[in-house]
Image: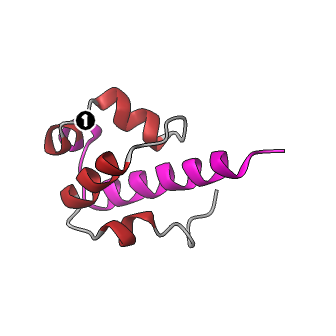
Amino acid sequence: MKSKVGILTKKFGLKVKIERTKRGISQMKLAEMTSISTTSIGAIERGISSPTLETIGAIAKAFDMSLSELVDINKVEL
């Protein structure tokens, strides 16, 4: 059985990927916009890394979204 944290991390990563691709932004460009490495962006999107609040905030700012909009994963299906 998957842990709750694992599922939330995977859903959040998928949300980041969806929002990034909707905007036509590459992982490399997002990394530049947020000062987060492309390796870290990839790990977040794959759901294998739980980002810090500061990282989530940087991604939300890059997407021109509020923090609450970005972390709302209720509609994300795995």
Image-quadrant location for residue 48: top right
Tell me, what colour scheme is on the image? Answer: secondary structure
Q: What stretch is highlighted in magenta?
A: 1-30
Of the pair 71 and 77, the residue shown nearer to us? 71
Residue 37 placed where, x, y %? 27, 29
Residue at 56% over, 48% down? 9
Q: How crowded is mark 1: few (under 14 residues within 10 Å), some or many (20 or more)?
A: some
Q: Quadrant of the N terminus?
A: top right
Q: What element carries label 1?
A: loop
User: Mark 1 highlights which residue?
Assistant: 36
Picture layout, residue 44 above or below residue 72: above
Would residue 10 be counted in the magenta stretch?
A: yes
Helix, strand or loop: magenta stretch: helix
Residue at 28% over, 55% down? 57
Picture layout, residue 59 above or below residue 27: below
Residue 52 placed where, x, y %? 39, 44
Q: In this view, does 68 lie to the left or right of 9?
A: left
Residue at 62% over, 63% down? 77
Would residue 74 be counted in the magenta stretch?
A: no
Residue at 56% over, 65% down? 76
- Report the amino acid beneath label 1: Ile
Picture layout, residue 32 above or below residue 71: above
Residue 7 placed where, x, y %? 65, 51
Q: Which residue lies furthest to the front in this view?
A: 53
Picture layout, residue 69 above or below residue 56: below
